[in-house]
Amino acid sequence: MNSYSFLITLFIHLEDPVFSEQDFYQVKACCSFSGPNFNHVEYIVRASFNKNNMKEYNSTRGNWIGFTNYSIVYSNLSNISPYDALERAMEKQLLCNDNIQVIQTIGNMSTTPTIRLKSVKHPNGRHPAMLVCSAYNFYPKQIQLTWLRNDQEVTEGVSYTDVIPDGKLYYQFHSHLEYTPTSGDKISCMVKHFTLFEPRVIVWNDSFTEEETTQIVVGLCALMLGLVILTSGFIYYKKKSALYNSICQGRAVIPVDVISNFEPFSSSNKN
């Protein structure tokens, strides 16, 4: 791959009495590297309040844009300020440009995870259904698996394994979900990793699994083979019976006592 993103997130809880304890201000800074030698670097800053987007800075565009009335006014003031432009340039240098060599090293070794979602039997039989979402052969180690039910995050009945090294630089990671199937529910597993430009979502299909499909195919093949052998045997039997009847057709049946009293023709001529 020749394009990567490096994300830095900062959470700031506001202590102003105007805001409640549940309010928070969030800033995300992202360095995006592209090109064969990572020669193109884009620095993006996004600010949000209580998960609502407020404003965004993009180094390629070179300015802020606001998404609310207040943030639009504040963005316009920032765009005409020479100090803000200098601050963004320093952040890009420290967070992005100074880490190009590190990102190149990680990028050369990084591998996108292989994701599998399947149904398994609960070892204690307490829940009617259990799903396992697995990520294989990925690097670097940091990965996040999230369960979604009808596009909403699920936290109950969820368990995780440790990130397991497989001895070949790469890792694997598994997460289990215990749930009660409900008609119309959409269960999915969302995976976030360094090598993915956006989260990958795998939707569970409650039809036949890959293993069950293989078993059904093997069973059908065995059944068809059995029918072919049975049909071949029946055809062989019919042909053999027809051949026997054609050979024996027209023969006279002579009793055993007649054969025992029969004298050869040559003996009668001697008399």
Image (spheres, rainbow, N blue to C red):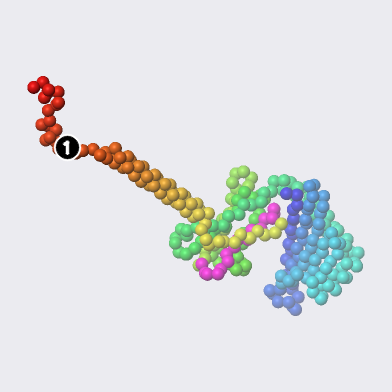
Q: Residue at the far top: name it.
A: 270
Q: Quadrant of the C terminus?
A: top left
Residue 75 x, y percent position in the rendering: 85, 70
Q: Is residue 253 left or right of residue 224?
A: left
Region rendered in magenta? 181-196
Q: Is residue 122 left or right of residue 30?
A: left
| Front residue of 229 and 11 | 229
57 to 259, vertically: above or below: below
Q: How many marks?
A: 1
Q: Residue at 14% across / 33% down in the picture?
A: 259
Q: Residue at 88% across / 67% down in the picture?
A: 79
Q: Is residue 124 left or right of residue 189?
A: left
| Front residue of 149 and 99 | 149
Visible in this render: residue 187? yes
Q: Say which quarter of the image contains residue 193.
A: bottom right
What is the crowding at mark 1: few (fewer than 14 residues within 10 Å), some, or many (at least 20)?
A: few
Query: Which kind of residue does numbered mark 1 sit on?
Result: Ile
Whether residue 192 is in magenta: the answer is yes
Visible in this render: residue 215? no
Q: Residue at 82% across / 52% down in the picture?
A: 40
Residue 106 x, y percent position in the rendering: 72, 48
Q: Residue at the far left: name it.
A: 271
Residue 240 x, y percent position in the rendering: 33, 40
Q: Residue at 51% across / 67% down in the picture?
A: 181
Whether residue 182 is in magenta: the answer is yes
69 to 163, vertically: above or below: below
Residue 89 x, y percent position in the rendering: 86, 58
- Residue that carries the numbered disc 1 in the rendered image: 254
Quick one: SS at disc 1?
loop
